[in-house]
Image (cartoon, rainbow, N blue to C red):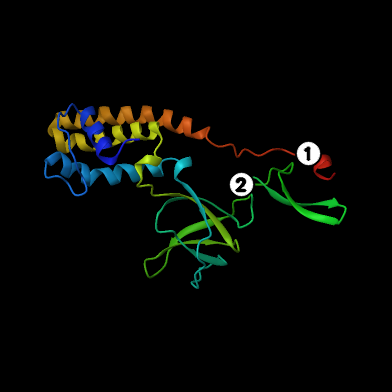
Amino acid sequence: MASEVQICNLALAHLGDSATIASINPPEGSAQAEHCARFYPIARDTLLELHNWSFATKRVTPPLLEATMDQWLYVYQMPSDAINVIAVLPNDAPDDYSALSYVPTDSGYQPVYMAPAALAYMPQRYSIEMLSTGQQVICTNQENALLRYTYRVTDTTKFSPLFTMSLGWLLASMLAGPVMKGDVGAAEGKRCYQMFQAHLIKATTSDGVQRDIKPQQVVPWIAGR
């Protein structure tokens, strides 16, 4: 997989820049390396926020805080590496489309998660807010909440090839102005952003088939067996 430096050189190549940088952390001293060091983290985090990437999804049990918020029963600490909150779930939910039901067994009725006819959606209501201290928190009525979220992936070996290509074009659109300057840089930035949008569609489409969490409908007369 491509490294940060290789992604930066890919972006520069999209601009027709013949420079080949060797380091952005720290920047090697060239103007191109300085620009890449400034814009690469912004481009990466922006792209991570635009889609619920399978390689950038985490599930954690966030710490419960003593803080209180009107209209919410629980306040949880936001993970320091969070880019996007995707869902707040019951801690024992096996997936996002399950509902607890009780089925008869030889030893009595046992709790079983299943997708009922109503296709109950497990994620709970939540709100991302800020405490007076400046700490970002997750407010919800879910006790013992499980958080599914997009995290800040800095290890480029986890990027999919199409994500890498999209990132190269997005970074190129940000570098165009500083590297090429003037009207030429503005026009090239627009072109690179259009290329990024085209590659983003391919990347998100491919990523979307990496998981199957669609609800499975179970009619009541079967669910009650």
Which picture quadrant has residue 116?
top right
Vertical order, 72 against 160 (above or below): below
Disc 1 target residue: 219
Looking at the image, residue 98 sits to the left or right of residue 197; the answer is: right
Q: Is residue 112 above or below residue 174?
A: below
Front-lying residue, 113 or 143: 113
Q: Residue at x 17, y 42 (%)?
A: 33
Name which residue lies at 12% across and 41% down.
Answer: 31
Residue 85 placement (x, y as % from top left): 47, 51
Using the rendered view, name the quadrant where residue 89 is placed. bottom right
* Residue 115, x across and y down, in percent: 71, 43
Residue, disc 2: 96
* Residue type highlighted by circle 1: Val
Q: Amino acid at mark 2?
A: Asp
Residue closest to the eye, 104 or 69: 104
The reply, left or right, for residue 144 in relation to residue 69 is right
Residue at the limit of the structure toward the bottom, as seen here: 66
Return the disc, 1 or 2, that comes first in the chain's sequence. Answer: 2
The image shows residue 211 at horizontal and vertical percentages of 55, 37
In the drawing, does residue 67 fall left or right of residue 193? right
Distance in Å between CA atoms under marks 1 and 2: 18 Å
